[in-house]
Amino acid sequence: LVPAGEVYYGANSDSYTGFCSNPVVSNAFSQIPSSQNKQCSSDVTGNSWAACAQFFTDNTKAYCVDSTGIKKEINNTSCVSNIIVCPL
């Protein structure tokens, strides 16, 4: 999603607003079972976004990516609907 986010940003007046409803995100999320927690959000100014999804094998963990290029494992409790950066 990180490269897709950068393409989206450049094609949308340097804004991530609407990125999470982009077909690239929708397609990625469609590959995740509906029972799994998955979230994507951009901040109100359109300057950042983050997405996360619960692990299949460990429901206490999730994987997070964001517009700063972070890609990391996080606690699933941090994978929330208003996530705009991956937690440190």
Image (tube, grey):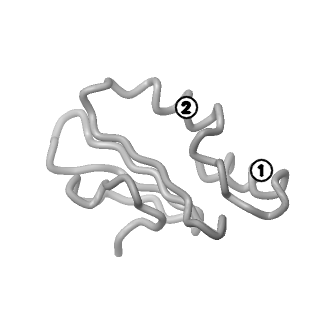
Q: Quadrant of residue 49?
A: bottom right
Residue 25 x %, y %: 57, 38
Q: Residue at x 64, y 48 (%)?
A: 19
Label 1 neighbourhood size at 10 Å, few (<14), some (14-19), many (20+)?
A: few
Residue 80: x and y in percent read 32, 55
Residue at point 66% right, 65% down? 46
- Toward the front, the furthest residue is 44
Q: Which residue is mark 2?
A: 26
Q: Is residue 31 above or below residue 40?
A: above
Looking at the rendered structure, the kind of residue marked 1 is Val
Residue 61 - label? none
Residue name at image x 18 percent, y 35 percent: 57
Q: Residue at x 48, y 64 (%)?
A: 84
The amino acid sitting under disc 2 is: Ser
* Residue under label 1: 7
> Residue most toward the bottom?
88
Quick one: quadrant of the C terminus?
bottom left
